[in-house]
Image (cartoon, rainbow, N blue to C red):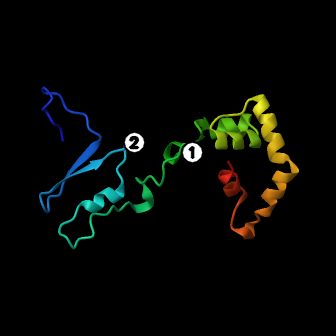
Amino acid sequence: MIDLRAGGKPLASDTLTIIDNRTGKTYEVPIKDGTIRALDLRQIKANDDDFGVMTYDPAFMNTAACRSAITYIDGDKGILEYRGFPIEQLAEHSTYLETAYLLLNGELPTKSELEHWQHTITTPSSTKISKAFSIRSGTTPIQWACSSP
């Protein structure tokens, strides 16, 4: 919908206007990062007893399950990035611990940060803690690492 009240120029808006042709009602749905929340469509009802409009996306071809600052995936284009770094680059040029540091801290470590990280992660107390999280405990080492401060 284009609003020409601003001197003949379209107004920018971060909303989507939806007209329900069943009822004639108009709804404004917020757009954030190019997406709308499926739950925002639930307000669109034919009557008071209606559950509301739901989305149907076979095979999740147009569904974003989450927003991540860590991982970017575009399967159609073959892209997998961690914190903006292509996985191929990390696999070729970074160690496992450098990549783990990147995932937790948002950037690759400097030489001194890596030395400190290696010492911290490989000390006997750290390895004892990680061994305490067996497969049977229900908590994986990745979950443990992600919950660490």
Give the percent coordinates (x, y) of residue 140: 70, 60
Placement of 3 over or under 45, stated as above or below: above
Give the percent coordinates (x, y) of residue 143: 67, 57
Hey, what amino acid is under mark 1?
Answer: Thr
Left or right of 100, for residue 25: left
Residue at the bottom extreme, as displayed? 49
Give the percent coordinates (x, y) of residue 17: 22, 48
Q: Within 10 Å of the Cα at label 1, are there few (<14), some (14-19), or many (20+) other Cα atoms?
A: some
Number of numbered discs on residues: 2
Q: Which mark is residue 144?
A: none
Along the polypeptide, which appears first: circle 1 or circle 2?
A: 2
Q: Which mark is residue 33?
A: 2
Placement of 12 over or under 35, stated as above or below: above
Which corner quadrant of the image does residue 6 belong to?
top left
Left or right of 91, for residue 81: left
Q: Which residue is mark 1?
A: 71
Which corner quadrant of the image does residue 96 belong to?
top right
Left or right of 61, for residue 123: right
The quarter in which the N terminus is drawn is top left
Q: Within 10 Å of the Cα at label 2, are there few (<14), some (14-19), or many (20+) other Cα atoms?
A: few
